[in-house]
Amino acid sequence: MILDETGRKHVVVTQHAPPDGLDLTRPDVAFIVPSDLAGYLATQHMGVRLYIIGADPFLWEMHEIAVAAGLGEGEIHLTNTGGTARRVYCAHCKTVTDDVTQTTLPCSGCGLPLAVHAHFSRRLKAYLGVLDIKQAV
């Protein structure tokens, strides 16, 4: 794991185990469990670099906490380890379907055929699914 050496404190939060190669013996590196992130960041000052590692929904949930704590985009580093599985939000019935690996799927809520777009909503923590007109006719 490569650290942004412009920071004075490096905070790592992961969805699972700490990444290989993370030197937890360094006094400027802290590994924080997700439930402690908000409280930990509240005690920090300028110079923190946050490294969030996990799948998309986790990344954006932790990102939201970091922004609320006052971190800027340049201080937050995201690494997606979730593979190709995505959370998809149906624009028609507002249902969220998790672990989607296809580019098209029937909505689990309304049953409409959906095309998964590259647009990711940070607010919804999901990719946008809209009517797949190729399959709807």
Image (cartoon, helix red, strand yellow):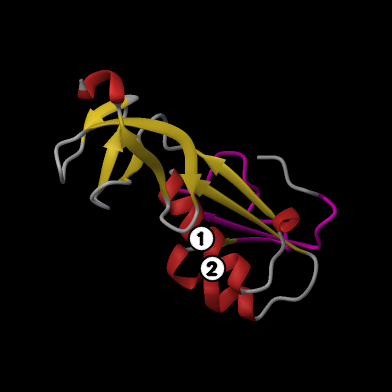
Q: Is residue 15 visible?
A: no
**In the rendered view, would you say 102 is above or below 78?**
above
Q: State whether residue 48 is above or below residue 99.
A: below
Looking at the rendered structure, the secondary structure element under dot 2 is: helix
Q: Amino acid at mark 1?
A: Met
Query: Residue 1 or 122: which is nearer the viewer?
Result: 122
**Above or below: residue 30 compared with residue 126:** below
Residue at mark 1 to residue at mark 2: CA–CA distance: 5 Å
Span highlighted in magenta in the image: 5-30
Depth order, front residue of 33/105 = 105
Q: Is residue 26 magenta?
A: yes
Q: Which mark is residue 65?
A: 2
Residue designated by label 1: 62
Q: Residues within 10 Å of mark 2 (few under 14, many from 20)?
A: some
Q: How many marks?
A: 2
Question: Is residue 66 one of those drawn in magenta?
Answer: no
